[in-house]
Amino acid sequence: MRTWISKGWRPFLVLILLFIIWEVAINLFEVPAWLMPSPSEIWEEGIASWSEFKGHFSSTAFLTITGFAIGCSIGIGTAVVLHLLPKVREAVYPLMILSQNIPIIVLAPLLVIWFGFGLLPKIIVITLICFFPVAVSAMDGFRQTNGEYILYMKMSGATKGQIFRKVEWPHALPSIFSGLKISATYSVMGAVISEWLGAQKGIGVYMTLASSSFRTDRVFVAIFMIMLLSLLFFGLIVLLEKIMVKWNRKEDT
């Protein structure tokens, strides 16, 4: 943790420098705000429109958390089943890979046709986005468990279920959390994409309205809030990983 803090100022400094260059360039070349607003204008608009924006933010956050929870739960459950049933995995795994070749942006309109404009198609979009990284990471984690530990458990008379609970599952946790972190970053963008299908509230709706009215400053407010929500979500997963994967802390000491 101390190592991360000692190095954390570097990207922060680079980010501040980029904002300064951006601000100076906008003022120097007198770029109109509708084309490219300055960071100070985006900040002022974010504060001024927060009372209107917070409802969209909370709607997207709720949609993200719900879809993420469902997608990751299904992904982990599927990985467990496919790991414990190798013959089923041989039949299903290639289909999982094939399903990732279907662009979500193409599938989304079909979900609206099938399920309407309610919450369900939006949850399905986020679920599909979160499912695959978690499922694949979990299965890789199960397969990479040290064979010597499994052999020792078998020699001790342990059942397949006991081997999974006491050896394979704990050792797969780092891989599972890697998949969760990937899904956490994708889930916010999935929520925004799903809101373009016809939602009444959400950052995606706010961004569409701002873009159609040439409020570029509001578009950038939405972009930065999407980034912030993704970082917060990612940070929560990292914190949960540090709590649950206690033996994997050598890098932080």
Image: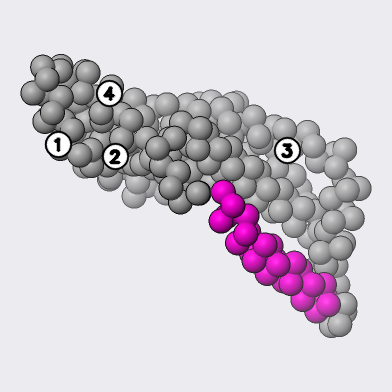
Amino acid type of the residue that numbered disc 3 sits on in the rendered structure: Phe
Q: Where 241 sits versus 2, above or below? A: above
Q: Position of residue 49 (x, y in %)?
A: 87, 45
Q: Is residue 85 left or right of 213 when viewed as pictured?
A: left
Q: Which element type, helix, strand or loop, lies under badge 3?
A: helix
Q: Amino acid at mark 2?
A: Gly
Residue 109: x and y in percent read 50, 40
Q: CA distance from mark 4 to mark 1?
A: 14 Å
N-term-proximal mark, 1 vs 3: 3
Horizontal relation, residue 126 to residue 73: left or right: right
Compute the Cα span from label 3 to label 4.
41 Å
| Mark earlier in primary sequence (2, 4) | 2
Q: Nearer the viewer, residue 161 or 198?
A: 161
- Mark 2–mark 1 distance (CA, rounded to whole Å): 15 Å
The residue mark sitting in front, 2 or 4, is 4
Which label is found at residue 57? Answer: 3
Tell me if mark 2 has few (under 14), some (14-19) or many (20+) residues whose alpha carbon lies within 10 angstroms of its own: many
Residue that carries the numbered disc 4 in the rendered image: 166
Amino acid type indicated by mark 1:
Glu
